[in-house]
Image: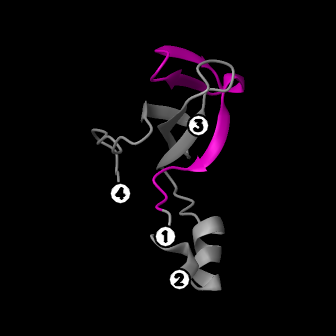
Amino acid sequence: MLLIHCPYCDETLPEMEFAYAGEAHVARPVDPSRTTDEEWRDHLFVRSNTRGPHAERWRHVHGCARFFNAVRDTVTDRVLATYPAGSPRPDLPGKDTP
């Protein structure tokens, strides 16, 4: 079971308190009406699937109900950092952060 820290409530709780919401920092096309079908498909479905530290979006469903981002190591399944939505991904010492 993952233990996840909500940066808004300042509590560390089991993952069943939260809902996974996909990869973090995915930029929406500036003008979706001008994207090709392939570009729109890639925006909706193609993700990085990183091995190691990976930025994810989570929602504290059974708490403040706010979205936030987390960096989770996909190898060890440990949450390395959490931070408010809209904030840049933090640099983690000793970790490869793209």
* Dot label at residue 29: 1
Q: Residues within 10 Å of mark 4 (few under 14, many from 20)?
A: few
Give the foreground label among 1 and 2.
2
For marks 1 and 2 on the same chain, the one whose residue lies earlier in the sequence? 1
Amino acid beneath label 1: Pro
Dot 2 alpha-carbon crowd within 10 angstroms: few under 14, some 14 to 19, many 20 or more:
few
Query: Which segment is the magenta one?
Result: 1-27
Position of the C terminus, as image quadrant, is bottom left
Helix, strand, or loop for circle 4?
loop
| Residue 76 in sight | no
Looking at numbered disc 2 in the image, what kind of residue is underneath it?
A: Arg
Query: Which label sits in the foreground, 1 or 3?
Result: 1
Q: Are marks 4 and 3 in contact (CB under 8 Å)?
A: no
Q: Which secondary structure, mark 2?
A: helix
Q: CA distance from mark 1 to mark 3?
A: 22 Å
Residue 48: image location, x then y, percent: 53, 63
Return the residue at label 2: 34
